[in-house]
Structure formats: structure tokens, C-alpha cells
Amino acid sequence: MSHDPKYPFPQVFLVDDGGRDPQHSVQPPGLIPCWSFPPARERARSRGKRQSCMGVSPGLLVVLLFLLMLVFAAMGLGAYQIHTLQRELVNIRKEIDTEKEFLTPAKQVGFQEPELHGEITDSRAAAHVIGRIEKDMSQKTLRWEAKTGRAFTEGGVTYRVEDGGLQVNHTGLYHIYSRVELLFKNCAPTDTHTHTVFVRRAKQNTPLKLMEAHRAGFCNQRQSNVWTSESYLASALHLEKQDRVFVNVSHPSYLSHQHHANFFGLYKI
């Protein structure tokens, strides 16, 4: 065994050639540096193991983290939308409650005057007709104008042109009213007049009197001027379906020619 101190490398040993003649031994070649490296496959495996985490590659970890971020973002967006919808629902409920307060009908006191030009917004059964001057003033049952000025019919109440009655199509409690104004010439202290409201029903042959006013002593004997007398009737009465309500006066020829001085109407309470 020989060793050259100039080369600090692993020593090389020469072994005899299995009993051959030592004279035929070959001179050992010059020593050269030698490094031992692991196989390529083993180096690749070791490099892969050192760069992975728990057996998962870094690229796959990035993809998983990105998917988790998408899931959390979607959950946050869903929670925000649910919160927004809840707030909108609360606002809608408040608006509905406010509208209900405004739409709740208040208790009606007295007669509600109809609007001009027939623009009636309430669907409640109601009617208001005004006086009509007839050529033949001998009929005690008065005729009316149902489409002139403030006159109207609404909610199933109809005016019968042929007999001057207001017909109701719903059974219930109604407020009925009528006013007449009469002008007397050469009035005497004994002059009187009668104002009557009556109803006709399908099951009854005779009319049923609802209200009546009798006026007397309205003239002054010492004066010969024209005298004016008026009568107003009003009451809450029960009417049945298909009832027809009429107005009578004892002196129809004395009626005032002012349309709004004579009127007749009703409305369901």
C-alpha cells in the first residue's frame, strides 16, 4: 500500500490477484480524486420530500387556500344580503302599517257632501238629487235631477225616472233627508202645506210613510207680499233591498224654481 501525502483523498488498497504471480502485477495507475453521489432518482425524491408540506405540494396548497377564501367571501356576501333583506322587510311593514292608519275610515258625523262634477270616490251606497221644474205641477210625488250639478247616485242606488223614486239594492240602515221650499202668493193665515217621505216595497201594496212635516200659520194677514215656507226632514231608517223612496208635497205648484232649494237624498250608514 502506498500513499502520496500530496493528495488528501481516500486511500486505495491493492489486493493480490488471487494467488497469481506477483511478478505479473500491474503498476497501479495514478490516483485521481473521486466523489460518490447518490443516484439521480434518489436525489429527486429527497428534494421533493424536503419541499412538500405533510405530503402535499405547494401548488395544491395555494389552490386550497384560494378555494377557502372564495367560500368565506360567498358566506360573507350571503350574510350581508340576508341582513339587507331583513331591513327592507322591516321598512315595508312600517309603510303598510302607516297606510292602514290613513286608510282606516273615521266615524262619519252628519251628511258628507258629494264632490263636484260627479267625482265620487266612496263606493258606499248613496244618492243626492235636486229639484226639477215640471210643466205639469199637479203631481204630488216630486221628480228630480240625478245628473245635474251636485246630483249623483253611487254604490247601487238608482234613480227611477218614471216615478221619481230612489231605489236601494242593499238592505241596511240609511240616513234619509229631504228639503222643499214653497213660495205662496196672496197667502192667507189659514194656508198649510205638508211634506212627506214614504217608501214602496215589493211585498206591500200600500206605501209606508217614513217622515212627515205639517206647516201652518206661516202667513201674516196684514201683508200681501209673497211668502216663503220651507220644510226639512231627516232620519236614520232601515230599508230593505229593492225599496223605493219618494217625496210628496201638498202644493207642488208652489215649489221654488231654485234647483238647490229643493233636494232629496240618502246614504247607507
Image (cartoon, rainbow, N blue to C red):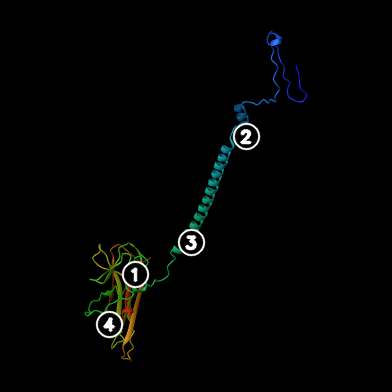
Indicate which disc, 4 or 3, sits on the residue closer to the N terminus: 3
Indicate which disc, 2 or 3, sits on the residue closer to the N terminus: 2
Vertical order, 59 against 81 (above or below): above
Q: Can residue 235 be seen in this view?
A: yes
Q: In which quarter of the image is the C terminus?
A: bottom left
Give the SS element for disc 1.
Answer: strand
Badge 1 vs badge 4, beta-carbon distance below 8 Å: no
Point out the residue furthest to the right here.
Answer: 5
Q: Which residue is under mark 4?
A: 254
Q: Which of marks 2 and 1 is in front?
A: 2
Give the SS element for disc 3.
Answer: helix
Which label belongs to residue 98?
A: 3
Quarter of image, res 50: top right
Distance from Cα at disc 2 to Cα at disc 4: 120 Å
Quarter of image, res 53: top right
Residue beneath the point at 30% across and 84% down? 183
Distance from Cα at disc 4 to Cα at disc 3: 54 Å
Q: Which residue is under mark 2?
A: 51
Indicate which disc, 2 or 1, sits on the residue closer to the N terminus: 2
Residue beneath the point at 52% across and 53% down? 84
Q: Nearer the viewer, residue 149 or 140?
A: 149
Amino acid on which the number 3 mark rests in the picture = Thr
Indicate which disc, 1 or 3, sits on the residue closer to the N terminus: 3
Give the SS element for disc 4.
Answer: helix
Q: Can residue 211 be seen in this view?
A: no
Q: How crowded is mark 1: few (under 14 residues within 10 Å), some or many (20 or more)?
A: many
Q: Residues within 10 Å of mark 4 (few under 14, many from 20)?
A: some
Q: x, y percentage for residue 9?
A: 73, 24
Indicate which disc, 1 or 4, sits on the residue closer to the N terminus: 4
Distance from Cα at disc 2 to Cα at disc 3: 68 Å
